[in-house]
Amino acid sequence: MSNLIYLVLINAVAVWLGARILRGVKVDGFVSALIVGLVVAGLNCTLGSVLDFLATPIIWITLGLFAFVIDAVVLKVADYFLKGLEIENFWWAVALALLVSVVNMVAHILF
């Protein structure tokens, strides 16, 4: 349970930072970022896992870079369902996915 809370908080911070750094990403506030973090964590467990499984050969061929595309799809699905998140286009979603991955990597190293 604590891992889920940790994952949601890290995703929320990453999305909030992404909204501050990337001009194509907007979040209404940190509470919206927490909701986005929760939804993205849930979508990664369901939709992300299915897409990762189906795209395994492509992920291998691209040496893992296609995983950012899958993460961007998950973020765009979250954008579609949530009012507090606005991602202008798919490329901003890819940039946000890259930033979220970097923040997650740094958080796992530090904590």
Image: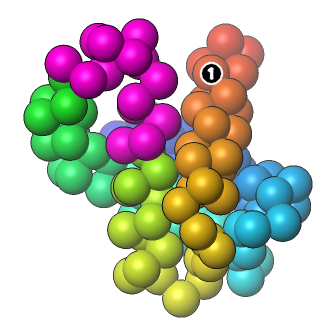
Task: Point out residue 71 in the picture as x, y percentages from the top left corner.
Answer: 43, 44
Q: Is residue 80 above or below residue 101?
A: below
Q: Write the residue at 39% across / 17% down.
A: 62
The residue identified by callout 1 is: 105
Is residue 108 shown left or right of residue 19? left
Q: Write the residue at 20% across / 31% down.
A: 55
Task: Point out residue 31 in the picture as x, y percentages from the top left corner.
Answer: 66, 75
Q: Amino acid at mark 1?
A: Met
Q: Quadrant of residue 102?
A: top right
Magenta span: predominant SS is helix
User: Dividing the image into 4 quarters, which one contains the C terminus?
Assistant: top right
Q: Which residues are magenta?
A: 57-70
Q: Nearer the viewer, residue 64 or 42?
A: 64
Q: Quadrant of residue 77?
A: bottom left
Q: Looking at the image, can residue 68 be seen? A: yes
Is residue 93 shown left or right of residue 82? right
Task: Point out residue 94 in the picture as x, y percentages from the top left corner.
Answer: 57, 47
Q: Is residue 25 magenta?
A: no
Q: Nearer the viewer, residue 104 or 76?
A: 76
Density class for disc 1 (Cα within 10 Å; few <14, some 14-19, many ≥20) is few
